[in-house]
Amino acid sequence: MKGLILSGGRGTRLRPFTYACAKQLIPVANKPILFYGIEALRKAGLTEIGIVTGNNREEIVTAVGEGERWGVRITAIHQAEPRGLAHAVQVARPFLGEDGFLMYLGDNLIGDDLSGMVERFNAKNADAMVMLAEVQEPERFGIAEMDGERVVRVVEKPRQPRSNLALVGVYLFNPLIHEAINEITPSWRNELEITDAIQVLVARGARVEAYRLTGWWKDTGRVDDLLEANRVMLDWWPKPVTLAGEVDANSQLEGDVELGPGSLVAGSIIRGPVAIGADCRVARSYIGPYTSIGAGSAVENTELEHSIVMEGCSLRSAGRITDSVIGKNTTVTGVKSRPQAHRLLLGHDSFLVIS
């Protein structure tokens, strides 16, 4: 069985960050989102992994290489236009061949171990299996209707849902899916929908099974989702976390704090869970729970909580910052001179709250 990770989306809902960074490489708990997906597939025993990329191909390839760090072999697959999940499977056909495969959406984070899903798929000799989770707004998702554990209907974002079971973004298929995809036509979004292809399998009498999610699931498509994913991942850390940097005698660390090599904490209070990358400096500051700080960043005379600070940032005398995502190599500096004024250099699609 092979793995297929879809990472070709443009990430328009995460601008301005995605102007300079593929959305799947945005860090959560100081690790690119895509890396969690690769780790999940590797843990499930899949060592041949294709990653479908779009105009972010070069950036993705540079980040993941050929998969050596995970003990897998990664093949980059180019999708010229994001024309739907089923279209991504089409362009990946030369890589997939006649093998069964697990398809995983690259901007998702899943709390479940995928090994159980793979084992059940094989044991039931299923033609397809979809991971499902109960949701409160089913009209926002692809929805499955069930007869026991068999899927009898799938609908993409129904106006009047008959079920609250959403397709999470993890699928298992045997080669029958390729024939089904060849039978469908583009939807109103001009995309080839994987839900339409699954419905073709159902109509043919193929064995389409469901696997119920027991853990958590986070879509990282929006800024608020990123912050929530950061919170969940920091809570979900395997323990113990590492403390590889230096902490002076005037500092206080509470809870789970990860401190990367070459980093220094001086005269500061840090209340975990907090992740601080390599070669950072935190001085005379308060770092509150659910915060991650990327490598090479400096935080001085600042209060920071429930936020993501990407690598290479400088926050000096920046007051209190909460519920924020700060992009790479950003400088935030406070001034005490009078009259006070804000000096702003903001890119396209920025979002700023001043209080």
Image: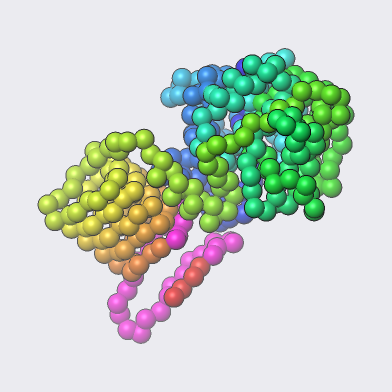
Is-magenta flag for residue 341? Answer: yes
Question: Which quadrant of the figure contains the N terminus?
Answer: top right
Left or right: 301 as drawn, with respect to 134? left
Instruction: Please report the residue visible at 33 percent of the width from the left and 44 percent of the height from the top.
Output: 277
Q: Is residue 301 above or below residue 3?
A: below
In percent of the image, x 19 and y 44: which residue is there?
Answer: 246
| 255 lies above or below 149 | below
Q: Residue at x 55, y 63 (%)?
A: 350
Q: Is residue 23 left or right of residue 319?
A: right
Q: Position of residue 340 (x, y in %)?
A: 37, 81
Work out whether residue 319 or residue 230 is closer to the camera in this orientation and state it.
230
Residue 200's x, y, as percent?
A: 84, 30
Q: Is residue 230 visible?
A: yes
Region rendered in magenta: 323-351
Instruction: Say if the magenta span includes residue 92.
Output: no
Q: Main secondary structure of the magenta part?
A: loop
> Where 226 sits versus 61, above or below?
below
Residue in the picture at 74% in, 39% down: 144
Q: Is residue 275 above or below residue 337?
A: above
